[in-house]
């Protein structure tokens, strides 16, 4: 890891890599959503999924552990929002149970990783 005051390369973080991969999967899954949702749930769920790796990336560029932890907290909020939107998409029958389970499992794993990383940053 980089020192407390040097920017990190976000590409080196496993949590960023996993959240980036999740965003690509969300884009693929939402491609099948109804056309009338393009400016509604499709847009919202995509923005949420992109917000997770985006906030991790921005935090890495801020140059300090305190700022990185803050942006990881924002990413955590986006992950929780995405978790709900995936549930709503399943209940609206836009996602199959299998798609929902797979994507939700990844979100939960990312939230666990973010929690551990935030704790490490605060205690390091």
Image (cartoon, rainbow, N blue to C red):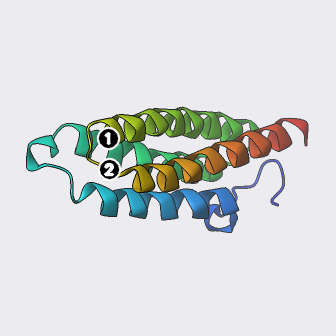
Residue placed under numbered mark 1 in the picture? 89
Q: Examine the rendering and report whether any part of residue 25 can be seen.
A: yes
Cβ–Cβ under 8 Å for marks 2 and 1: yes
79 vs 11, nearest the viewer: 79
Question: What residue is shown at x 82% (from left), y 61% (from top)?
Answer: 1
Q: Residue at x 52, y 34 (%)?
A: 80
The residue at the point 90 percent across, 37 percent down is: 123
Q: Judge the density around disc 2: few (<14), some (14-19), many (≥20) Cα neighbours within 10 Å.
A: many
Pick the residue in front: 23 or 11.
23
Residue occupying the far left of the picture: 36
Q: Residues within 10 Å of mark 1 (few under 14, many from 20)?
A: some
Q: Which of the pair 35/118 is nearer the observer?
A: 35
Name the residue carrying label 2.
95
Q: Residue 2: x and y, percent?
A: 80, 59
Which residue sits at x=65%, y=64%? 9
Q: Taking 45 as reference, is 111 left or right?
A: right
Whether residue 58 is visible, yes or no, is no
Q: CA distance from mark 2 to mark 1?
A: 6 Å
For marks 2 and 1 on the same chain, the one whose residue lies earlier in the sequence: 1
Foreground of the two, 36 or 68:
36
């Amino acid at each position: 890891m980089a020192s407390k005051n040097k920017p990190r390369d976000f590409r080196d973080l496993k949590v960023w890599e996993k959240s980036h991969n999740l965003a690509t999967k969300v884009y693929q899954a939402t491609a099948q959503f109804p056309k009338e949702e393009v400016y509604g749930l499709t847009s919202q769920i995509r923005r949420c999924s992109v917000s997770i790796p985006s906030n991790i990336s921005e935090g890495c560029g801020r140059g300090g552990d305190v700022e990185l932890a803050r942006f990881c907290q924002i990413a955590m909020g986006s992950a929780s929002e995405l978790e709900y939107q995936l549930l709503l998409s399943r209940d609206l029958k836009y996602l199959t149970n299998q798609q929902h389970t797979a994507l939700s499992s990844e979100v939960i794993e990312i939230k666990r990783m973010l929690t551990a990383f935030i704790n490490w940053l605060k205690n390091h």
